[in-house]
Image (spheres, rainbow, N blue to C red):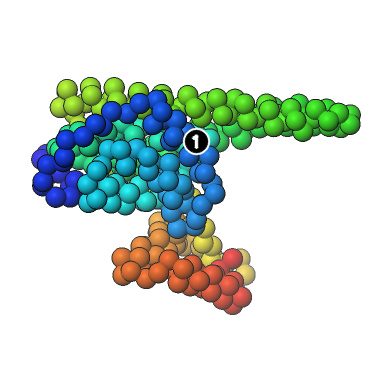
Amino acid sequence: MTMTKTSNQGSAPRDEQDTSIHQKDLNRVFWRSFQMEFSWNYERQMNLAYTYAMIPILKKLYKRKEDLSSALKRHLEFFNTTPHIATLMLGISTAMEKQNADDPEFDSATINNVKASLMGPLAGLGDSFYWGTLRLIATGIGTSLALQGNILGPILFLLVFNVPHIFLRYLFTKFGYKLGTGFLYRLQQNGMMGNLTLGAAILGLMVIGGMSASMISINVPLTLGSGEGATKVQDMLNNIMPGLLPLSAFGIIYWLLKREVKPTTILVGIAVVGILGAWIGVFE
């Protein structure tokens, strides 16, 4: 299979520049990562905060306006994961952006493909540890003291949750960068970068498809016939293909976006269709 380079707009060579990434650069990414939920939006969720955290790196790596613009647009794509573990992905993206800046033959599409393929598994790990384990431990300690009227209750709750969280967030930034740098170097030496691009793209599409199927819920309560012989329309649709209605809804929304319909208009349309459908009994 022949892989073609799909990005790095413009064939002109980049200007000579220092693209070394130092600890102070990673520290800037770390501090900016705390904004991860401040600009959360329904269309692309954490994309603005992710791009904001990457800006110091991108400005250092890309001195040409065209290259910087392409990099900023690249990270404005959809992204969502557990905010406390996002620095691991930011570190990996930093390593990949450096590789992209250093190697004109690097396929920058790989950067977003890797983000899409990792954000789901990272969210599963992050939610289980931070929300399902660490927060419960902190709540148990804080609540037991607070019920006794001890002022240390809320203080310990904040400390038990945030001290490990901030420490791990800091380590993940550096670990993600080192992981990405070593991994990319080995792939380049083995000539496996094309396989990474293809595999990450496939896995990323599977993650997005799984999210669409699990996050869109449409149920039709209508029945055909009466009495014991009545058949539910929803059962008929499920027998044809489970998730047929969510897939159809996703396809319609995707088609509207391709037609450059504004996301706000689509959201209003979804609300109107949902309310009217529930009112007349078509949707449940």
Instruction: Count residues near mark 1 (Cα–Cα under 10 Å), then give few for <14, some for 14-19, many for 20+.
Output: few
- Report the residue at 53% width, 74% height from top: 272
- List x then y, in percent, for residue 4: 13, 44
In the rendered image, which quarter contains the N terminus? top left
In the image, residue 165 above or below residue 75: above
- List x then y, in percent, for residue 132: 62, 33
Q: Residue furthest right?
A: 148
- List x then y, in percent, for residue 173: 43, 29
| Quadrant in the picture for residue 14 | top left
- Report the residue at 15% width, 27% height from top: 191
Q: Identify the residue position indicated by label 1 in the image.
A: 31
| Quadrant in the picture for residue 103 | top left
Q: Is residue 18 visible?
A: yes
In the image, residue 127 above or below residue 211: above
Towards the viewer: 179 or 103: 103
Report helix, strand or loop for mark 1.
helix
Label 1 is placed on what type of residue? Trp
In the image, residue 74 above or below residue 114: below
- Report the residue at 31% width, 70% height from top: 259
User: How many numbered markers are drawn?
Assistant: 1
Q: Is residue 43 left or right of residue 93?
A: right
Q: Is residue 130 left or right of residue 268?
A: right
- Report the residue at 45% width, 72% height from top: 265
